Image: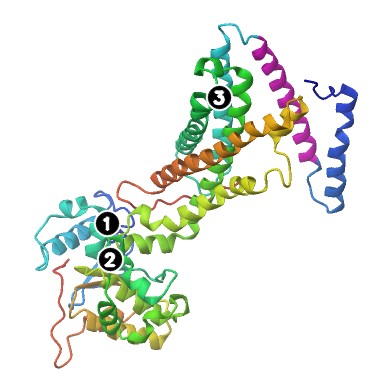
Amino acid sequence: MLRQLAGLDPLLPPSNGVARDGGPVSTGAGAEIRLGSWSSARRFLTAFGGSGRTRSCTPEELLAMSPATYRRRVGFVAQEPVLFPGTVADNLAAGPRYRGEVLGRGESEALLGKVGLPASMLLQDATTCSGGEKQRVALARALANRPEVLLLDEPTSALDAMSAEAIERLIATLSQEIPIVLVSHAPGVVARLSASPGPGERAPRCIEVRL
Amino acid sequence: MTGAPIIPLSGLAASVVFLAMGALVARRYRLPLVRELAIGGARAALQLFAVGYALTALFAHEQSRAALPLMGLVLIAMLLAATFTAAKRVRHAPTASGSLAAAAALAVGAGSVASLAPIFVAILPGTVRENLEPRIVVPLAGMMVANAMNVVAQIFERYFAAMANDRARIEAALSLGATPAQATMHVARDALHAALLPTLNGLATVGLVALPGMMTGQILSGAAPSEAIRYQLVVMYALVAVAAVAGGVALTQAQRLAFDDRDRLRRFPEKTR
């Protein structure tokens, strides 16, 4: 379902109300939803179009945007993200480069900081990254596009327990800044991420998706 | 002008010994190719005899009014055969019937026109009408169409194989806002390079390693080598245009088939053969 919302697979036709990918979805806001039908996809798009950062628009308008624009605004990180050949810096700059923009060194370092990686990694060959590092670089690469919402498809399922826990904490932190929708079949992930914020933390931003 | 002696039928029959050599070596290594050698040999003989007599008939009517339409038929047959050969063996190809063949026809046609038109309009000495003689058109068109066919087949094979095998990387680029052209640039570049390579190698080694077919033919039929090289050079340059234009069009067509109207990469199941 997330791949469909990311604009990589066709959305289910309106007649197909049957859940296909009924895994729990966390909005990072305590509400557990099931995205698996056309109507819930519509609700997601409605909420996204009407969220504070963007001008309000209908799902139809959203879907009518150029695919490149839609995908820039709706960030997506796949289950096992693929890094492009080249350095970590090349990977971070990919999204802006597709639009003819340049990602400055300062911005790249800030992005790495956001996902908990040292600035010294910028010039590292991306193929030498470990599984956890790949996931972080992919998150930073998606953030470089300044998306308005981030879709994460089972972000921890390909990682060992320790890396998975670290990525979960990172996602919880990121959800303070950007609405995150994630699908996970691993028990507990959604529940932990949906738990109320710890002391000193703001309540996570959420997109208004309710079923 | 004294041409090479005509090969007698007995000599022609004796040339089957070459196929036997192939069969012997294949058997030694237990390659199951003997059947294919026999079929391929028979098929080549049949096709060449048919073409030989058809061309003889065509050349005999060179002065008649039927010459141009007949030649058109021959060219169309060539294009059709090349198109279906180019589209046939592609694994992971679009399944919608005819779509790949239509794309192949467009690419082969564009490459052939881009190379043949300048030859007949500007390079040969006479007027276009004078130059459009079957004995000039058919061999030149044959070489161009054959090269276009090989280039298009290779581009399709590589492009669609990469769409299946490199899917994760292409979709990662798409989801970062890349257009299909941007997301598949590395695939397109590799495919075009591989398709152009034989033609480029031909340019570099021509005359050093082998005398190419056209020149060999002209020399065998008694032309002066100094004249034969002019045709050969024009042909070799034209082959570059064929490969580039047919390759470029094939890539645009492949991309059009591989992505849907919302720039989503389609899925093509592997063909079982």
Whether residue A35 sits left or right of residue A50 in the image: it is right
The residue that mark 1 highlights is A68
Residue A194 appears anywhere in the view: yes
- Residue A32, percent across and down? 22, 73
Pick the quarter of the image with the N terminus of chain B.
top right
- Residue B44, percent across and down? 74, 31
Marks 2 & 1 on one chain: yes
Q: Quadrant of residue B143?
A: top right
What's the residue at 49%, 32% (across, down)?
B109
- Going by the numbered disc 2, the residue's amino acid type is Pro
The residue that mark 3 highlights is B124
10 Å neighbourhood of mark 3: few (<14), some, or many (≥20)? some
Label 2: element kind: helix
Chain identity of mark 3? B
**Of helix, strand and loop, which mostly describes the magenta segment?**
helix
Looking at the rendered image, the disc whose residue lies closer to the viewer, 2 or 1, is 2
The residue that mark 2 highlights is A96
Q: Magenta stretch: give its range.
A: B35-60
